[in-house]
Amino acid sequence: MESQTLTYAIGDIHGCAELLDSLLDRIAAHAGDRAHRLVFLGDYIDRGPDSAAVLRTVSRLNWAEPERVTCLMGNHERMLLDALLTPEAARHWLYNGGEETLDSFGARDLGGLPRDTLDWLEALPTLHGDAAHWYVHAGLQPGTAAPDSDAHDRLWIREPFLEGDHDFGRHVVHGHTPQRDGRPDIRRFRTNLDTAAVYGGALTAGLFSDAQGPALEFLSVPAA
């Protein structure tokens, strides 16, 4: 295992800052002195109690060690960015948890959000890969090579990605579709790490090696 690259992939956080802090502590203890990467699968914001704290944590990790910490964009980050463009998009975002995000920043409206935070969100990638995996927020369009996939699909897709078994050449690690039982959804060619933290489930990290597709194990912190 020493020759393998280990990656802890973390599912949808949605403003659950305390769960994130606890999970990062568990990861640090679990990894010990082994070199490892972190991949965050997006949806840091909305619905939960402290999106501002989550963004501070993940962005600082990314800024401090960009070669070791990858932060992907989720559809909720995309909704926030779109909300800056049109009133209709702003209403859509607020309806889907944006009010809680504004509250966490102490902002009355979108103009009160920090510019550096918005710039960081705008620059987030929608796909990350290693030798054995594709990491993406929502999923990929079957029949399309991952690097050629549509950015909208990477952020939003459910069907036909979730139905059947689709082999993308590498194991797909994703979130986006909450598993209300609080357990990851483990399939032959994909693993869903959205274990519904904001809905009372758990916040989950999967440990992956670039030498094989399926997770080696999972670390979860249940919601109180």
Image (spheres, rainbow, N blue to C red):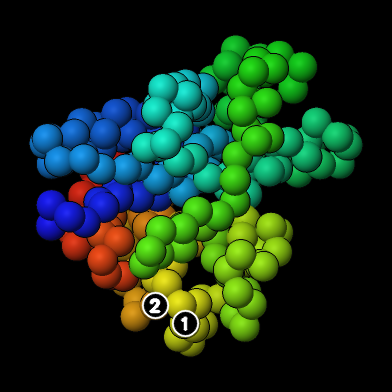
Image quadrant occupied by the C terminus: top left
Q: Are marks 1 and 2 in contact (CB under 8 Å)?
A: yes
In the displayed structure image, the side of residue 161 where residue 35 appears, left or right: left
Looking at the image, residue 13 lies above or below residue 64: below
The numbered mark, 1 or 2, whose residue comes first in the sequence reads 1
* Amino acid type, label 2: Phe
Looking at the image, residue 162 lies above or below residue 106: below
C-alpha gap between disc 1 and disc 2: 6 Å
Q: Quadrant of residue 36?
A: top left
* Amino acid type, label 1: Asp
Q: For mark 2, what is the residue?
A: 189
Outermost residue, bottom side: 164
- Residue in the image at 36% along x and 67% along y: 132
- Tell which of 169 and 83 is nearer to you: 169
Q: Locate residue 221, reporting x and y percent.
A: 23, 43
Q: Locate residue 46, reporting x and y percent.
A: 56, 36
Image quadrant occupied by the N terminus: bottom left
- How crowded pointer 2 is (Cα within 10 Å; few <14, some 14-19, many 20+) is rated as some
